Amino acid sequence: MRFAQPPVSPSDFVRTGQSVALKPEGRKAFFRAYEQRMDSLVTHPMFGYRANYRRILEIQSRLLAQVLTGELNAYPVFVTR
């Protein structure tokens, strides 16, 4: 998924002293983009089936648990573009 323009721009931030925070509209845009990304489908390289990023995070967590308990020797890394 590519955005024509970034979902959040410098104008979506407010600076107070040395702190920076997102304005309400910027925060909404960020979470909207985050939810769209989490719902997008990708193919898991180890298993070969398509799943959304929420499911991929669950799969990777389970694989990490298997490495930590000794069921797997190495962690199969999942890399996004």
Image (spheres, rainbow, N blue to C red):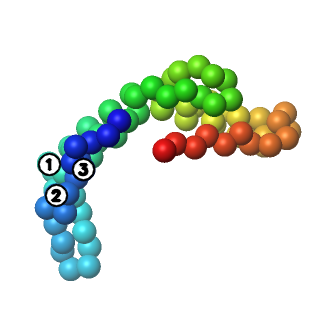
How far apart are the two marked residues, 1 and 2, measured between alpha carbons? 7 Å
Dot 2: few (<14), some (14–19), or many (≥20) neighbours within 10 Å? some
Q: Residues within 10 Å of mark 3 (few under 14, many from 20)?
A: few
Q: Earlier in the sequence, mark 3 or mark 1?
A: 3
Q: Mark 2 points at which residue?
A: 12
Asked whether disc 3 touches disc 1, contact meaning CB atoms under 8 Å apart, the reply is: no
**Which is nearer the eye, 41 or 32?**
41
Quick one: label 3 or label 2, which is nearer the N terminus? 3
Q: Label 2 near label 1: C-beta < 8 Å?
A: yes
Is residue 80 something one can see in this rendering? yes
Q: Find residue 55 and report its horizontal and vertical position in percent.
A: 53, 27
The N terminus sits in image quarter = top left
For the residue labelled by badge 3, is the local secondary structure a helix, a strand or a loop?
loop
Residue visible at 32% across and 33% down in the picture: 36
Q: What element carries label 1?
A: helix
Outermost residue, bottom side = 17
Relative image position of residue 34 (x, y in whole percent): 34, 40
In x, y percent, where is residue 7?
Answer: 23, 47
Res. 25 mark: 1
